[in-house]
Amino acid sequence: MVGSDVFRAKFFSLYLPLTLYLVFLLFPFYWMLIVSFKPTNDLFDMKFSPFWIQQFTLENYLYLFQNTDFITWLKNTLIVSIVSTILSLVCSIFIGYALARLRFPGSNFLGLGIFLAYLVPPTLLFLPLAQVISELGLNNTYWALILTYPTQLIPFASWLLMGYFRTIPKEIEESAMADGCSRIQILFRMVLPLSVPGLLSAGIFCFTLCWNEFLYALIFMSSGSMKTIPVGTVSDLIKADTLFWGALMASAVLGSFPIAFIYSFFVKHYVSGLTAGAVKG
């Protein structure tokens, strides 16, 4: 009886809420997937249940590849996301390490200020950034986004890495300095190898934000063959009052796959990097 009471208590207090939350969390992805494999007519025919597939088809994916520039959108998104992530990580490593280890007047306030800069809404920044990009003649080029995205990525990544660098014992660096290593040598030979979870966490965050970003991509790279996946999906698959639901969902599925792939392999490092930075930051 005691065992059954314990199981019943765990079921209602733990397993049932987790199951409901899991269904709530995964249902949009399930819906997106089944709609992408349904014929267009089935989507609007009330004879068919909307919760599963009666007739399996690949016509939505074929439409996406044959009637849109999805491959070009994918290439543009990859180039912008990878280069922006690398640029942001390089800058954040030096900023985070300097704030974590070097002591100078105002260092604590500077660290707080960098994090507060991340909280500024992008909708307040795109007007001045649009003017800068226009003055530099970078509209509709990769550099328009590669130079813009780090304004949002570097503050948070620097704050995250600063917290992670502080979890590394100072004694390791002091011993290396006693052996004649410079700060740069310590950073690249000792600190970075010990900070892989933090680097992966910051990198995944930066890549995800770049991959899903819509506002700046719509303003700076929305014409011709320079569209990214979010912009191309909205502009080419939503025309006036006509929505190509099957192709929209197919684009969403394919666009979500790289992010899901990355998180599935690095989720442990991502969580450990975030928690370490949160506790010690």
Image (cartoon, rainbow, N blue to C red):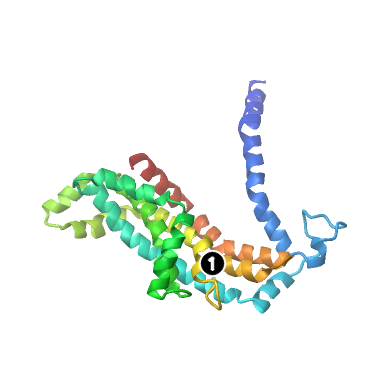
Residue at (24% x, 52% y) in the render: 98
Question: Quarter holding the N terminus?
Answer: top right
**Is residue 219 found left or right of 234 in the rendered image?**
left
Q: Is residue 244 above or below residue 20?
A: below
The residue where tag 1 is placed is 218
Residues 34 and 88: in front is 88
CA neighbours of label 1 inside 10 A, class few (<14), some (14 to 19), many (20+) = some
Residue 105 at what x, y percent from top left?
A: 19, 45
**Is residue 170 found left or right of 268 in the rendered image?**
left
Question: Quarter holding the C terminus?
Answer: top left
- Number of residue marks: 1
Residue at (70% x, 55% y) in the render: 31
Residue 275 at what x, y percent from top left?
A: 41, 43
Q: Secondary structure at mark 1?
A: helix
Q: Is residue 102 above or below residue 85?
A: above
Q: Residue furthest right?
A: 47
Residues 204 and 92: in front is 92
Amino acid type indicated by mark 1: Leu
